[in-house]
Image (cartoon, rainbow, N blue to C red):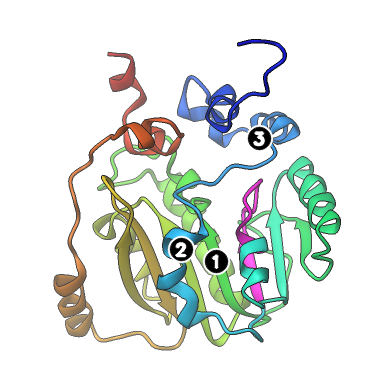
Amino acid sequence: MDSDKAPTMTQIQRVDIPSTATAYTDPVYWNKRFYSEEHYEWLKDYSQFRHLIEAHIQPNSSVLEIGCGSSQLSEELYKDEITDITAIDLSPVAVEKMQKRLISKGYNEIKVLEADMLDLPFRDECFDVVIEKGTMDVLFVNSGDPWNPLPSTIARVRAMLQGVHRVLNTNGIFISISFGQPHFRRPLFEDPEFTWSVEWSTFGDGFHYFCYILKKGRRKTLQAEESAATKNFNVSPICLLQDELENEDYIFRTNINEIDE
């Protein structure tokens, strides 16, 4: 690459792609990555799924974004006149950079805090909406058989969901943007300790991502859930198109050993 030419976004995104998915569980990796990364969107940007969530977030909603990283999701929500936003990330580097970026753009109302999604530092029932995009998926790195995840994986995911359920108000909504298919996510979402209903839609070309809407206090009967699942479940086969290969999402959908082969 010529030294006098600025790197393209694709080139920037490829710089920090690790050789193995294990790196995604290492805080040191994320701090190093965020130090040089200005912006990256996992699982498509807000414009691709806005139509699926806009009915569930009102201008006066208090919103918690889990795992903000270098995403612009909070900024896009703010542009939609949703101003009571708290964004958290485990990386102090990501938090500091986002704080500076938001201030530079005049988005002073958005709060950005360093916090662990497995141990949310908020009081009970304090948010109307909790949203995450690709953050929970990181918990499934090296999780073993997707049909029967390791106990350690289940424990981490459950800890996250328990925290989300706790901080949501009585009629709060959890929005999860994920590549995880319903037959893998539903057993965790539908644990008996949670009172939310579970719905989902798909979006994206080539490979379908999933938008899960979990409404606290509105758990359906098993029969109704199965009926809804039959109606909504339409999963396209995995197809790694060129635009998918130019970002990191495929790493979570493909066995790393298979890539090398």
Tell which circle, 2 or 3, labels the residue nearer the N-terminal end: 3
Label 2: which residue? Answer: 176
Q: Position of residue 3 (x, y in %)?
A: 70, 11
Tag 2 secondary structure = strand
Q: Is residue 11 left or right of residue 141?
A: right
Q: Residues within 10 Å of mark 3 (few under 14, many from 20)?
A: many
Give me the disc on residue 30.
3
Q: For this rendering, which residue is in front, 220 or 250?
A: 250
Q: Is there CB contact under 8 Å for labels 1 and 2?
A: yes
Q: Nearer the viewer, residue 132 or 183?
A: 132
- Residue 247, image x and y in percent? 45, 34
Task: Give coordinates of residue 186: x percent, y percent.
Answer: 31, 64
Instruction: Look at the numbered disc 1 and give the secondary structure of its residue.
Output: strand
Distance from Cα at disc 1 to Cα at disc 2 = 6 Å
Q: Is residue 134 above or below residue 123?
A: above
* Residue 33 sits inside the magenta stretch: no
Residue at 19% across, 55% down: 235
- Residue 183 in the image, given as x and y percentages of width and height: 24, 58
Q: Nearer the viewer, residue 156 or 15?
A: 15
Residue, far front: 4
Disc 1 marks a residue whose amino acid type is Ile
Q: Secondary structure at mark 3?
A: helix
Q: Earlier in the sequence, mark 1 or mark 2?
A: 1
Q: Can you say whether 232 is above or below 31 in the image?
A: below
**Mark-to-mark CA distance, 3 and 1:** 20 Å
Q: Give the numbered dot on residue 131.
A: 1
- Residue bounds of the magenta highlight: 63-74
Extreme-top residue of the structure: 2
Establish if 10 lies above or below 40: above
Quarter of the image containing the C terminus?
top left
Residue at 70%, 58% in the rendered image:
88
